[in-house]
Image (cartoon, rainbow, N blue to C red):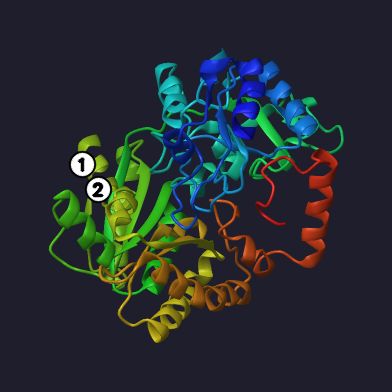
Amino acid sequence: MMQQTLAASLAEIVGPDRVKIDNESLQLYGRDWTKAYEPAPAAIVFPGSIDEVQALVRLANKQKFAIVPSGGRTGLSGGAVATNGEVVVAFDRMNKILDFSPVDRQVVCQPGVITEQLQQFAEENGLFYPVDFASSGSSQIGGNVGTNAGGIKVIRYGLTRDWVMGMKVVTGTGELLELNHGLVKNATGYDLRHLFIGSEGTLGLIVELTMALATPPCDPTVLVLAVEEMEDAMHVLQAFRAKVDITAFEFFSEKALKHVMAEKGLPRPFETEGNFYALIEFENTSEAVMDTAMSVFEHCMEQGWVLDGTMSQNTGQAANLWRLREDISETISRFTPYKNDISVQVSKVPSFLKDVDAIVNSRYPDFEIIWFGHIGDGNVHLNILKPEDLDKTAFFQQCGDVSHSIFETVKKYGGSVSAEHGVGLLKKPYLQYSRSEGEVAFMKGIKKLFDPANIMNPGKIFD
């Protein structure tokens, strides 16, 4: 009865067809890609305008219910999971590109715009939106901003934060703020825009974004190189960065490659096997650039850092080589992996990987560990695969038992327990390993200022 009453109140704002309380909708919209939590929202609501979002927030304050924002639900930290009778605000209807300025190279869009939709719009207008990752076909730009998503080309183009030129947000009190107005230069005090980027919906709801666009890359060319040790990959990275303006430097393990080849039917890029593989992308802007890239590759071979390698000759080959890296997450999803998105300084990656491998192998030698990630910016993805005969609950419990040791190692290296998926619920118990008590206290103070009633995604990041 209470759920029906709440749904009726929500329907007065958005219309009866825009509120869902059936179990299928609650399960679909109440979760993200994490599998550790069971969703239990009270209702799903689909606003179509800023006015409706403001009305929903004011209603939440009046009736004292909590709000969980929902985008493409591709996060891996539980930031979009509704577990305690919250109202999920899904931005699927607010999915339009509102304005475009070719002079400013800026596009104004609603938060429900799919990342790939923005990329395609940029391409159609002779420009480029460079923030890219495996979930770009389903993630929404509002969620990207809410978690400050990174992806595969951070080494050249930076994080989502670097492309947000302005935004409109509805705070926890229902107030609408318009931040930065698309300005390149704005030295008028605190830039509140950057508080909302990465805030995971805990301060307010992003309802409009002004995003910058870039010049399209010229003939992206891909190298895949086999290396014996991660230390060798560091030498390769240094050698290429000294001579070539690279746009990506990724890595994956031989174990990851075998899973992708088996699942996707992709051929091995070359006969030689390495323990790890580096994937390098650069713009083939001239014959001189190609000659330089080949010269660096040959130098790395001569030094013994590279065992073997291949280079794409056209865009089709480049796309196929990227699949060796980009198809990993989807491929291993059937193993119900325990995932960790962590980062350290680039130079510390090799020793960090060895330390974490030793921790997991000492406790659970039968668990398979899959490594891949964005080694060019120090972001690595640890994936522990669930054995087929082990119960999911028991598996996550066992993985959780080693998490504190893993995050102690992250702290020892001065790293982050979450590089690009936010804190949410999954990383909340480990925030202390990356943030001091003083930092958390200030974050709680900021939260209270923008959301005094604690209705905005409560329980995420910290309690």
- Which of these two is toward me, 99 or 221? 99
Q: Residue at x 46, y 76 (%)?
A: 356
Is there any visible trace of residue 102 in the rendered image?
no
Q: Which quadrant: the N terminus?
A: top right
Secondary structure of residue under mark 2: helix
Whether 90 is drawn above or below 350: the answer is: above
- In the picture, residue 250 is in which quadrant? bottom left
The percent position of residue 118, horizontal first and vertical second, equals 47, 25
Q: Residue at x 33, y 75 (%)?
A: 367
Q: Residue at x 41, y 36 (%)?
A: 24
The percent position of residue 249, horizontal first and vertical second, equals 41, 54
Q: Which quadrant: the C terminus?
A: bottom right
Is 365 positioned to the left or the right of 359 in the image?
left
Q: Residue at x 51, y 47 (%)?
A: 39
Is there any visible trace of residue 435 in the rendered image?
yes
Secondary structure of residue under mark 1: helix
Whether 25 is drawn above or below 460: the answer is: above
Mark 1 Cα-neighbour bin, 10 Å: few <14, some 14–19, many ≥20 = some
Is 288 positioned to the left or the right of 59 in the image?
left
**Residue position for label 2:** 321
Image marks 1 and 2: residues in contact by CB distance under 8 Å: yes
Whether 140 is drawn above or below 364: the answer is: above
Q: How many marks?
A: 2
The percent position of residue 397, horizontal first and vertical second, equals 46, 72
Q: Amino acid at mark 2?
A: Leu
Cα distance between the residues tagged 1 and 2: 6 Å
Is 457 positioned to the left or the right of 359 in the image?
right
The percent position of residue 385, horizontal first and vertical second, equals 33, 66
Mark 2 Cα-neighbour bin, 10 Å: few <14, some 14–19, many ≥20 = many
Q: Amino acid at mark 1?
A: Gln
- In the picture, residue 224 is in which quadrant? bottom left
**Residue position for label 1:** 317
